[in-house]
Amino acid sequence: MSDARTIIAERVARMFQAGDLVNLGIGIPTSVANYLPADANIFLHSENGFVGLGPTPDKESEDKDLVNAGGQPASILPGGSCFDSSMSFALIRGGHLAATVLGALQVDEKGSLANWMIPGKMVPGMGGAMDLVAGARKVIIAMEHTAKDGAAKILKECTLPLTAISEVDYIVTELGFMEVTPAGIVLRELAPNVTVEEIQSKTEACLIIPTQIGTM
């Protein structure tokens, strides 16, 4: 995992409270499990059918029949539970998730999200993302700040097909921690050695800059 992805996962891991049931999506979100304190008492949900997701296992401990929602080797903590998709989505749609953490292709200043389709490319489909962002009480986007070609991913308005409209609550990138509010995107924290000017130059949406900005 790159330094940028580690920074993002570590910051997201600090966003939960004891007793929370949290869904982790594929990609960067999955690695959040590696940075939760051992005594955090946070229950991690995997869309493909279990609660009790643990850290990524060592090669010697991998089980081909135990994978996360992205098909990567996973672990289940003692006391964890496995179930079918109907139970998994009953948890999601029933409002039982304190939070969901997803990656994104684009997020805009209204909190709308595009994370499932790039026109002209073959994709497997939206999966459970639409259900997750509609059902979870808190929606956290964990993504690198810009695309591989340097294009902004935090926009005034999404241009890719939407997953959800006005559902995102927080955005965490390697450059900063942001909150989506009715007034726009507020910059709450900056990563060490990152300036307001730098993060704004890589963000199409106009960030709201408060008097006090924390260090991520």
Image (spheres, rainbow, N blue to C red):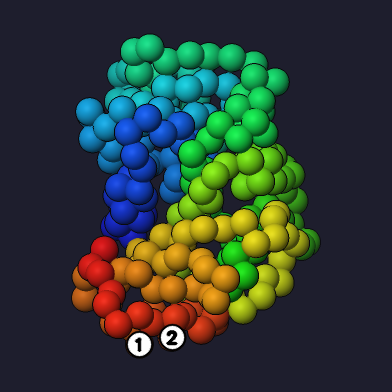
Coordinates of residue 20 in the picture (x, y in percent): 41, 34
Residue named by callout 2: 201
Q: Amino acid at mark 1?
A: Glu
Residue found 67% across the figure and 34% down from its top: 93
Toward the viewer: 11 or 40? 40
Q: Quadrant of the C terminus?
A: bottom left
Q: How many marks?
A: 2
> Quarter of the image holding residue 92?
top right
Q: Going by the picture, which residue comes out furthest to the right?
A: 120
Q: Is residue 136 left or right of residue 114?
A: left
SS state under label 2: helix
Looking at the picture, how far across and down is residue 82, in whole percent?
A: 53, 14
User: Residue at the spot x=60%, y=35% of the render?
Assistant: 95
Instruction: Look at 39% across and 73% down and name the residue there.
Output: 187
The disc label shown at residue 197, or none: 1
The reply to whether discs 1 and 2 touch (Cβ–Cβ < 8 Å) is yes
Q: Position of residue 176 (x, y in %)?
A: 35, 68
Q: Residues within 10 Å of mark 1 (few under 14, many from 20)?
A: few
Observer able to see residue 1? no
**Res 79 seen here:** yes
Name the residue rendered at 49%, 73% in the picture: 185
